[in-house]
Image: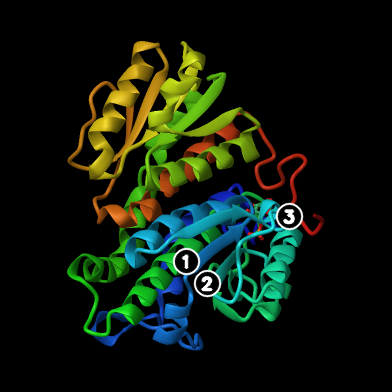
Amino acid sequence: QAAEKGGYAHFMLKEIHEGPRTVQDTLRGRLAKEERIAFPGLSLTPQDLQRFERIAIVGCGTAYHAGAVGKRWLEQWLRRPVEISVASEFRYSDPIVGPDTLVILISQSGETADTLAAMREAKARGATTLAIVNVIGSTLAREADAVILTQAGPEIGVASTKAYLAQLVVLALLGLFLAQLESPGGLPPHLQTLVSALPEMPQLLERCLQQEEAIKALARKLVSSKSFFYLGRGLDYATALEAALKLKEISYLHAEAYPAGEMKHGPLALIEPGVAVIGISTQSLTREKMESNLKEVKARQGTVVVVEPEGVVSDGADERIVLPSAPDYLMPILAIAPLQLLAYYIARERGCDIDQPRNLAKSVTVE
Ligand code: G6P
């Protein structure tokens, strides 16, 4: 096993470091000439897209969190409603899906029982099902109407890292591809900018990972915190959900993600010395609001860590994690990497069994 870990102490750390290559592999062959997105093998026509009045995204755990990012991307880029559901809830919710619905199911393994049940329910109701899956030949890949493969390679660590990145990249490509189908004259400039920026992501992600030593030091400062909040707005809230899950899964510390603006409606009562608050602030639209939300935390003596792009310095943070700058829409692809590392190093400080956390399984095949 030591050889398989390639010199890393854990599969999780190895897989975090495989992030940039995973992004590159997932982009390969899908960014065609003249900066157009291509999905060889996916036969969706503009007429199909017109038929889909509704889009639903379904997944569990990390895959669900990738879907939470995807929901915002697709909704904004296609200007149509996109719903997101946890697979175990979707199935028994008498979902409003039918022949006019595209149901996107996201799963690393393609074997999660709840996600399979959700797919079968959607198919039974006449929806078109599209699986975003990492394992070729998995049940989800075989049964869905259409499949897009993420190219993360085998993921061994129970806590998903590189597969999440690959899911984000596929969702970004898919959103831009669908927008392209709708605009025969070419994408509007604000979306074309994203197509041009995608090839830069592996290298920017590599820069995020270069902060490893600083993050290790930050983990040592935070490890004795009694509780963690991850705050964000919009896309950053989706990142907060995934970052909090990483910490819970492998360190057994209590971590909760909250939309930053909602803190004052309850959870602010929990803030006191010894509570760590990670504020994710990558979106220019909400930066000032985030800053004032974090000041409210600081005033109650919580420890504030802000995650923000270079060139931006929020007031009042105790610690900063700096990200390379990229278009706001693509920041979730960068922001998660240092937070995966932070969860990893906090768990390591606590001596946890990182690759095999207690009570958890890599693939959950019971409902
Ligand atoms: C388990 C794993 C998670 C994963 C979830 C969904 O809970 O521990 O890491 O996100 O299942 O798995 P899937 O294979 O469907 O993405």
Amino acid carrying mark 3 in the image: Tyr
Type of the residue with mark 2: Gln
Horizontal relation, residue 2 to residue 35: left or right: right
Task: Determine whether 28 is above or below 236 in the image.
Answer: below
* Earlier sequence position, callout 1 versus callout 3: 1
Residue 85 spot, x, y in % from top left: 59, 54
* Element carrying mark 3: loop
> Disc 1 and disc 3: Cα gap in Å?
35 Å
- The amino acid type found where label 1 is placed reads Thr
Give the label on residue 305, or none: none
Q: Is residue 117 above or below residue 304?
A: below
Element marked by disc 2: loop
Disc assigned to residue 22: 1
The structure residue drawn at horizontal position 26% and vertical position 49%, both measured from the top left corner, is 324
Q: Where is residue 111 in the image (x, y as percent from the top left)?
A: 73, 66
Q: Which mark is residue 151?
A: 2
The x and y percentages for residue 179 are: 34, 74
- Cα separation, mark 2 vs mark 3, equals 31 Å
For residue 294, above or below residue 64:
above
The image quadrant of residue 119 is: bottom right
| Numbered mark located on residue 92 in the image | 3
Residues at discs 2 and 1 in contact (Cβ within 8 Å): yes
* Image quarter in which the N terminus is found: bottom right
Does residue 274 lie above or below 256 as drawn?
above
Give the secondary structure at mark 1. Answer: helix
Color theme of the render: rainbow
